[in-house]
Image (cartoon, rainbow, N blue to C red):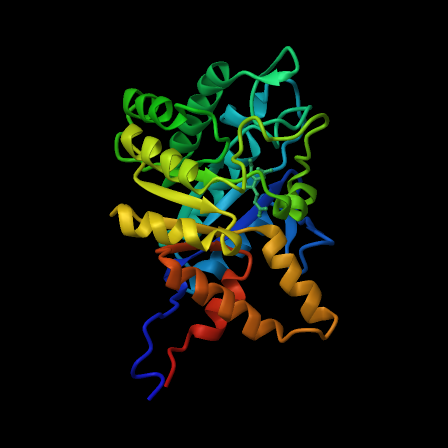
Amino acid sequence: MRRLVRETHLQPSQFILPLFVCPGTGLRREIASMPGHAQLSVDEAVREAAEAERLGLGGVILFGIPEKKDDNATEASSDGGIVQRAIRAIKPAAPSLLVITDVCNCEYTSHGHCGKVVDGDVDNDATLEWLARAAVSHARAGADIVAPSDMMDGRVGAIRRALDGEGFPNTPILSYAAKFASVFYGPFRDAAESTPQFGDRRSYQMDPANGREALREIELDLEEGADMIMVKPAMPYLDIIRQARDRWQAPITAYQVSGEFSMIMAAARNGWIDGQRAMLESLTAIRRAGASITVTYFAKQAAALLAPPVR
Ligand code: PBG
């Protein structure tokens, strides 16, 4: 009877698995704070992607750990960059899997900020050019969707114009529209080696206290041409997901971030919580709040549990 009247269902095709790609071959460098996740060389990332496809996941989202970082995030937009190489290797190996790319600079700058630093602060408008160049290089390598996560104002419009101008009018933009300056990104920054070397991201990421401002950010990104929007983190911001769902028709993505994952894993490993149930309850709550798509480090485990479909 419960099954008959259930309102919310999880499907593997709604999940997106984040992958961290690093230079080298045959490498799987475990991330201590994110059990089961590792920095993967391109060949290993291809294996993960093939597994993701086999499990019926909707896609993967790629983050790069470059050969070398510099002040201008050079590798972020280089055709031979780590993410660009990974896309070219993954697409033919897992043709029915969507390859989404995170478009940002923080993994590529020596200072760890998401954009060009001028006089000790990130210069919004100068960064737009970098982002547009990176998004075009991802599309050229074969990315199915580009996902800017930098939170610069005007970047969706800048990326849209660049993609259209370079012959990629059909590449959609999934915008990290409401991205909060959150403590829950901690484990990710270990994984992606992207902790800012000075200051923090509060000049471009949002105040967790501001819900109305989050809706304004989403609205602006949709006006600039975002095809899908994202709320991030997920569980502490279910109210934002719900309000966005009620207000707009665009697909809404929720990012269950590294800290959300690591907290559940840590509690489960201590025997303080049933990890599997916590995973499913959190994913169900995110979907019930209104997310159409969920980026989650649980993507593989959840998909493996959900398929074969419930009897
Ligand atoms: C890059 C980016 C971050 C995350 C996704 N893209 C880190 C940050 O903004 O510091 C976090 C994802 C996670 O915690 O799982 N800007």
For this view, does 69 lie left or right of residue 210?
right
How far across and how far down the image is residue 247, in percent? 27, 47
Residue at 31%, 37% in the rendered image: 172
Q: Nearer the viewer, residue 98 or 260?
A: 260
Q: What's the residue at 44%, 22% (across, down)?
A: 133
Closer to us: 248 or 174: 248
Q: Residue at x 35, y 32 (%)?
A: 221
Above or below — where is 272 with respect to 17? below
Q: Is residue 44 above or below residue 23?
A: below
Viewer-proximal residue among 267 and 55: 267
Q: Quadrant of residue 193?
A: top right
Q: In the image, residue 296 lies at what x, y percent?
A: 51, 56
- Picture coordinates of residue 281, whole percent (x, y): 50, 70
Using the rendered image of the protein, determine whether residue 92 is visible from the camera's viewpoint. yes
Q: Residue 145, image x and y in percent?
A: 37, 40
Q: Please tell me in which quadrant of the rendered image residue 163 appears.
A: top left
In the rendered image of this protein, does residue 99 appear above or below residue 78? below
